[in-house]
Amino acid sequence: MSCALALLLAPAGAWTARAQVSGRPLQFPSHEAEEQREANRVQQDKRTVFHVEVRRVPVDVVVLDKDGKPVTGLKKGDFEVKEDGKKQKVLTFDYENGETPSFVPPKLPRMPPNTFVNLPKGPEAGPLYVLYYDMVNTLREHQMAFRQQLLSFVDHAPAGTRFALFVNAAGLHMVMGFTSDHEALREAILRDGPGPHVPKVFLGGATEFGPGEYGAGNTGAALSNLNFLAEYLGGIAGRKNVIWLADMFPIAIGPGPDGAFDNDRNVEESGEIEKTYASLMSSQISLYPVDLAGVEGGIAHMAKYQNESAIGTATGGHAYFSSNNAEDLIEKAVTHGESYYALSYEPSDLKFDGSERRIEVALKKKGHYTLSYRRFYFARPESAAKVAGREEILQARFVAAKDADTLYANIEHGAPMLHDVLFSVHLEAVGQAEMATAGQMDQLEDSPIYFKTRKRKKSAKALKPVKLEKYKIQYGVLDTDLKARARDEKKVPKLEFAAAAYDADGELLNSMLNDGLASPEPDANGKFGVLFHAEQELEVPPGAAWLRVAVRDEVNDRTGTLEIPLPLKPVPPEAAAKSSGN
């Protein structure tokens, strides 16, 4: 693919970057590159996540008072953390207040056609939420009623809360990536197929007479979906609350009082359950089972509710059930997980042998408090937790790359918009689609959608050429930190520009990555501005529905991301002439 990065002249009074650049496809790195990045990451120790090398265990603690309200103002010394009964030293401590906006965007002028800025429409608040609607495990008669309650919840959801929507119906699909635009989320729920959508009624789901075509109640399928969510969310910083919407939740609760899994399950199934819990912990996911079945009675349903409660408790979340108002249950789940204390500790037992470790958190202060946090983890190597059950080579390498390099998680389709580095993008289709050359097809073949068409055990055959459409991506980067560093010749700004095209199902079609080493130049008055421009080109294969772009400051890993729907909207001739200055 084309990997050219051209630097454009900036307006008068702005800083124009003069760069030495190199380009390469943003594909799956070699094992040697992975090892080098991992060594760099361990040396820098930038993130607080659980790795064998870093030896940090993150624990998010929700603290509620007797009235169920979040408790604020606690200090690190107020918490006591134990692992297997032994006191641990809390290394990092922070409080995330979901009621206070974490990001408030500035007001922007009206943008020219097909010009986008990595800023949300309004303030963002709280952690990330995944609405996981499991239609396979929801009775058909409950699906229609719940659809209206889901829409009503979205209409009244707290402003600024970021949601992603996944639906399990004949497979797990992302219907909407993370967004604080609740109107866009509503439109996604109402959207019909083809492509990922929320069926009004999924006929393959459960019925009162049995599991349905797609196997409601199947533990293996449920674990597979949770593992997929864990892999997808891995590498994205912070707590993620997965609100599991269904009638049934066919997984084991995890270790019981005796420290073992359900003895009725076979060894293989218990092992898969353990791997799933390990993956959830590694990706900092808390589960919130929300039962859509309404009020039920009897001993069997009591056991069901106990299992749901145990799933939530074990992962640091909470289960909600026994109500005919599903909208209210979702609202309670969102409220429960929005404010929390983020702690981490280095375990005193450094033998990472896969054993189960019990976590206990208590408050030293007197009073009636309810604490929610994950109750255990498995001391497994990170790589073992992440790639468990994934046979596809490229997928395993991509998961490993995400763990070593934050760019891979942030360039994924549907990942949260980031604004640590602010930039604008003007996107333009260049010319007509043209048939790819043999060299271009060779570069495409490592993308997941093309890899799946090739049989690993058979001799590789050249992929049939496809038509490629070229897009020109023009960046304008605005950043005060870059301005400060630009004045110091010893701290030359280093930026990465990444672009990735995805189809409607979120499959990666093509991608590229450019490095830029910029040197500042003063304007006519001898002053430095903060704006510089860069240009990329990317050839996009057929079926592209999304283009995601990212700008990363290599010095401190600050990143900005933006996702643009394709194809572009037509630009009226008068608007095109105005934007070009004619």
Image (spheres, rainbow, N blue to C red):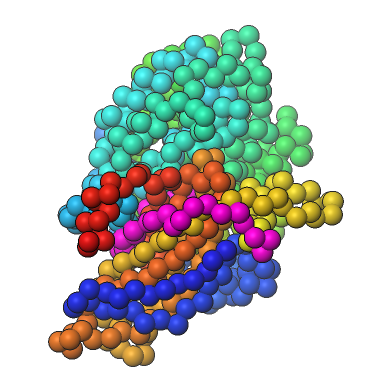
Quadrant location of the C terminus in the rendered image: bottom left
Quadrant location of the N terminus in the rendered image: bottom right
Residue positioned 35% across, 44% down in the render = 569
Q: Which of 141 and 447 is in front in this view?
A: 447
Residue 474: image quadrant is bottom left
Residue placed farthest to the bottom in the image?
Answer: 489
Q: In this view, does 286 lie above or below 189?
A: below
**Residue 423 forms part of the magenta stretch:** yes
**Residue 70 forms part of the magenta stretch:** no
Residue 520 seen in render? yes
Residue positioned 53% across, 72% down in the render = 23
| Residue segment shown in magenta | 413-439
Q: Residue 452 location in percent, x, y?
A: 70, 46
Residue placed farthest to the top in the image?
Answer: 209
Label tally? 0
Answer left or right for 243 relative to 34: left
Q: Residue 57 location in percent, x, y?
A: 51, 59
Q: Which of 6 and 288 is in front in this view?
A: 6
Q: Is residue 57 above or below residue 361?
A: below
Residue positioned 26% across, 30% down in the render = 156
Q: Residue 210 location in percent, x, y?
A: 65, 13
Answer left or right for 503 relative to 352: left
Q: In this view, does 4 lie above or below 242?
A: below
Q: Nearer the viewer, residue 148 or 365?
A: 148
Residue 108: image quadrant is bottom left
Q: Residue 447 location in percent, x, y?
A: 63, 54
Answer left or right for 367 relative to 293: left
